[in-house]
Image (spheres, rainbow, N blue to C red):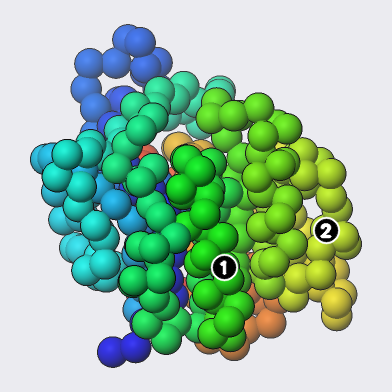
Amino acid sequence: MTTEVVTMGEAMRLLVAEPGVSLRRARTFRACVAGAESNVAVGLARLGHRVRFLSRVGGDPTGAAVLATLKAEDVDVSAVDTDSGGYTGILLRDSHPSRAIEVQYHRAGSAAAGLTARYVREQGLDGARLVHVSGITPMLSDDARAATAELLAMARAEGATISFDPNVRRRLAAPECWRETLAPLIVQADLVFAGADELRIMGMSAHDLKAQAVVVKHRDHSCQIVTPAGTWHLPSAATTVVDPVGAGDALVSGYLSAWLRGAGPESALRRGLASAASVVACVTDIEGLPDQEDR
């Protein structure tokens, strides 16, 4: 069947500490998969969409576990390249509903950092209507930055809609590095999902972007959507928060699913907020993602 959505990025093995226990004191961890684009891919696949994931993993047990998890979620991983001499990134974190989350990355120089423009050209879009990528991918390496630029250029040439989430992680680079890398990319997007603080780092406002829709996430977890047709502001739909991590990617997948089915901006945002509420009620980035029966 024809691919609806292509996402590209790094999928890592996620180890989450037992709920409420700090990372340095944790003895028990839950294993899962995490990564901005892979989270969105899983969210869309659960909602019945055909999603193709472009990436690279190491030829190690961690990479095998990542691919098995994504495949079990009906994400098409047939184009994922396995680097026999490389390693797959690992992310350790804790989970707490009310304090800052502790995070530890082991990803520098991982197989995913070896994404290239040539790889993107070889894999293609397979007829996808929508391409989604986050700002994390071009920050992995110069090659990954070129791969992201190639993916967006290919999407534009083939008439696919471009969805972009800056997903700024200050642990990975300084704000000026994010601004330099992401500014040329975010302006190409048709659909943008950005935190208000991320837009400030970019030196932009939602109105500066000539996108079909810009979803702005606020610190109180409400969202504003800005479109040429109007602006809407909706509150968070969450009633129970167990683990706040993954809400942004769930918002994206819920919104994009509704958009793919023809929903308008306000309706799509409500679906995104509902998906985010489902995720934060569970531990891990993907466990709480809704499926078609939950829509």
For the question of whether residue 271 can be seen, the reply is no
For the question of whether residue 284 can be seen, the reply is yes
The residue carrying mark 2 is 206
Q: Residue 161 is drawn in which quadrant?
A: bottom right
Report, in whole angstroms, how far the alpha carbon at label 2 lies from the one at label 1: 20 Å
Q: Residue at x 76, y 71 (%)?
A: 211
- Residue type at mark 2: give it: Ala
Marks counted in the figure total 2
Q: Mark 1 Cα within 10 Å, few/some/many (few <14, many 20+)?
A: many
Q: Which mark is on residue 182?
A: none
The image shows residue 45 at horizontal and vertical percentages of 35, 71
Q: Mark 2 Cα within 10 Å, few/some/many (few <14, many 20+)?
A: many
The image shows residue 258 at horizontal and vertical percentages of 55, 78
Q: Residue furthest top?
A: 25
The answer to whether 238 is drawn above or below residue 95 in the figure is below
Tag 1 or tag 2, which sits nearer the N-term? 1
Q: From the image, state whether disc 2 or disc 1 is nearer to you.
A: 1
Q: Secondary structure at mark 1?
A: helix
Q: Residue at x 83, y 58 (%)?
A: 206
Left or right: where does residue 225 sit relative to residue 24? right
Of residues 46 and 153, which is closer to you in this image? 153
Q: Which mark is on residue 152?
A: 1
